[in-house]
Amino acid sequence: MITIPKGTKDVLPSESYKWHYVENMAREVARAFAVKEIRTPTFEHTELFLRGVGDTTDIVNKEMYTFLDKGERSITLKPEGTAGVARAFIQNGLQNGAMPLKMYYITPVFRYERPQAGRLREHHQFGVEFYGGVGADLDAEVILLAYTLLTKLGLKVELNINSMGCSKCRAEYNKALKAFLSSKVDAMCPTCKQRYEKNPLRILDCKEDACKQICLDAPKITDYLCQDCSEHFENLKTYLNISNLKFNVNPKIVRGLDYYTRTVFEFVTTSLGSQGTVCGGGRYDGLISQIGGDSVPGVGFGMGLERVLMLMEAENVLIPNEDNVDVFIASSGANANFKAFELCNALRQKGVKAETDHMQRSFKAQFKYADKINAKYVIALGDNELESGIVNVKKMADFTQVECKVDEIVNFKF
Ligand SMILES: [Zn+2]
Ligand SMILES: [Zn+2]
């Protein structure tokens, strides 16, 4: 038997309604925030992610699905949603249109993760990208959009925010952080030993206990913000306050990607036992110019949809299943079979979810099947009914039935 590749998952017909529910809710909330969908390819030139995600990140160093295509070009399956959108923004000259440009995406993303950690190598993300505005009002909108969606999906989340400053104040902070860490490098995990030289900020969100200990008294980036960054951060807090959204300022949040400036945020939940991040994002004013565009500011987030569904299950959120059938037309005999087929098609043209037998079953077996597919109504059509021109329409919830002319079935209110 050929089996599914490691770290991937099937969504079976019996559970796809859960995905529709989450995706429809995401689209609905995006619409309310005046955000339009953008779709970009599943793969891009590898260089885009080297420049756009940053070559000191775990994603780029260890986790990308990179291969040479038949034309010897280095291609990578997208490991996150932002870089592709930024590339499309530049290539299509979207900065010449109306600003800000608010976009969302729903996309598969690919990372070569260790499967024993329960991580998927292909998962799906909903994300938004707002380009063009520098003010903290856009940061707040992005955060509120994520919060609105998570809440509508029935999840209880807490918001952590931080500011990573700009290139100016972060350089100051990096100096202070390196000075603080210089005597402690030996005690760090091997990854953080490398980070110390290239990207010391990332040591702050290392999950290793030794590194967590080391960072307890580390200087806080919020103490090093320049005037502009500090004002931006205060404005963000004001926008969140007037929206009645509670938040914690957590200076340990630095996010895993190199492109963030100023605002970073995470929504966390404890519903799976330990604390976990369900959505993270922030501002990236340098990204577009980093991959070759004009200087256009941006802010956004990514949300793992498998994780959202797992959390909804843990929170016992009831997802409405609309994959039922309005009416099942059971039939017996050649003429009745043709009539049932014809009626089914006529009903479907009117938007009624209709089904009939395709397995040459007995009436009894057809009724059983109608029950299995949650048919709201069942009609039995045989030679007698064809002759009299009258059928019984049976409501499955209470087994009540009403008579209906065969010619009128197509107008019945199912
Ligand atoms: Zn600054
Ligand atoms: Zn570490």
Image (cartoon, grey):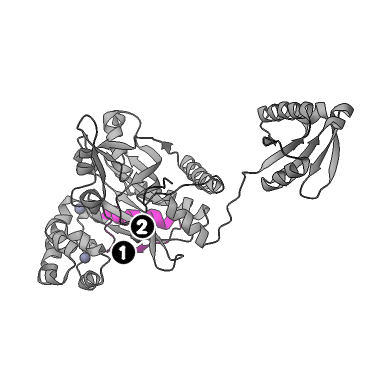
* Circle 2 residues within 10 Å: few <14, some 14–19, many ≥20: many
Amino acid on which disc 1 is placed? Asn
In which quadrant is the C terminus drawn?
top right
Asked if residue 96 lies in the magenta stretch, the reply is no
In x, y percent, where is residue 336? Answer: 78, 29
Which residue is drawn at the image coordinates 20% and 33% (left, top)? 73
Mark 2 highlights which residue? Answer: 266
Q: Nearer the viewer, residue 133 or 312?
A: 312
Q: Are marks 1 and 2 in contact (CB under 8 Å)?
A: yes
Q: Nearer the viewer, residue 111 or 246?
A: 111
Amino acid on which disc 2 is placed? Glu
Q: Is residue 274 left or right of residue 220?
A: right
Q: Nearer the viewer, residue 314 or 345?
A: 345
Q: Which residues are magenta?
A: 231-255
- Residue 192 visible in the displayed image: yes
Asked if residue 235 lies in the magenta stretch, the reply is yes
Which residue is drawn at the image coordinates 27% and 29% (left, top)? 91
Q: Is residue 302 left or right of residue 65?
A: right
Q: Is residue 175 left or right of residue 80?
A: left
In x, y percent, where is residue 108? Answer: 38, 43
In x, y percent, where is residue 1? Answer: 43, 46
Q: Nearer the viewer, residue 255 or 338?
A: 338
**Sequence-wise first label, 1 or 2:** 1
SS at circle 2: strand
SS at circle 1: loop
* Circle 1 residues within 10 Å: few <14, some 14–19, many ≥20: some
- Residue 288 visible in the displayed image: no
In x, y percent, where is residue 58? Answer: 23, 54
